[in-house]
Amino acid sequence: MSTMTRFTVAVIGTGPEPDNIVWGESAAMAYRHGEAYEGLSQCDLVGCADIVRENAEAFADEFEIGEGDVDMQACADAAREADVEWLIYEHDMPDDPAASIETGAAFLESL
């Protein structure tokens, strides 16, 4: 008898709701992914994030994801234990890219 592998899934970059698509910025693909994960019995959709808080909240409401903040230190510790080589800071459209890189680098170094 084989055991099915289970996956815990979080969506990073939810974008706006499908009814509020901002063409050229988002096609609400995260919602398509969310629908697909809901249909897979081996996947648990447990988290989401977006630089626009309202987008993440709408996605969480749509897919019944609980509220809370991600413990980034625990994530970094788990990544180290799993021998993950890279932690990546992403900010798609910062007002000041150089400042965003500095902020991201400092944050990752603090972990």
Image (cartoon, rainbow, N blue to C red):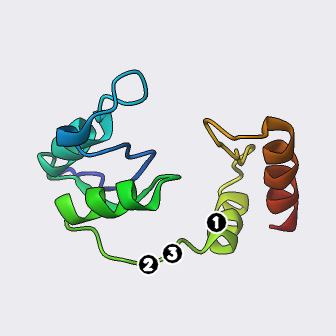
Residue situated in front as seen by the camera: 85 or 49: 49
Q: Residue at x 64, y 68 (%)?
A: 72
- The residue under label 3 is 69
Q: Is residue 37 visible?
A: yes
At label 3, counting other C-alpha atoms closer than 10 Å, the crowd grade (few under 14, some 14-19, many 20 or more) is few
Q: Tell which residue pokes out farthest to the top in this image.
A: 24
Judge from the rendering whether residue 19 lies leftward or rightward of residue 7; answer left or right.
left
At label 2, counting other C-alpha atoms closer than 10 Å, the crowd grade (few under 14, some 14-19, many 20 or more) is few
Per the model, the C-alpha gap separating discs 3 and 1 is: 16 Å
Amino acid type, callout 3: Asp
At label 1, counting other C-alpha atoms closer than 10 Å, the crowd grade (few under 14, some 14-19, many 20 or more) is few
Per the model, the C-alpha gap separating discs 3 and 2 is: 4 Å
Per the model, the C-alpha gap separating discs 2 and 1 is: 19 Å
> Do the CB atoms of the residues marked 3 and 2 lie less than 8 Å apart?
yes
Q: Residue at x 16, y 44 (%)?
A: 35
Quarter of the image with the C terminus is: bottom right
Amino acid type, callout 1: Ala
Q: Secondary structure at mark 3?
A: loop
- The residue under label 2 is 68
Q: Earlier in the sequence, mark 3 or mark 1?
A: 3
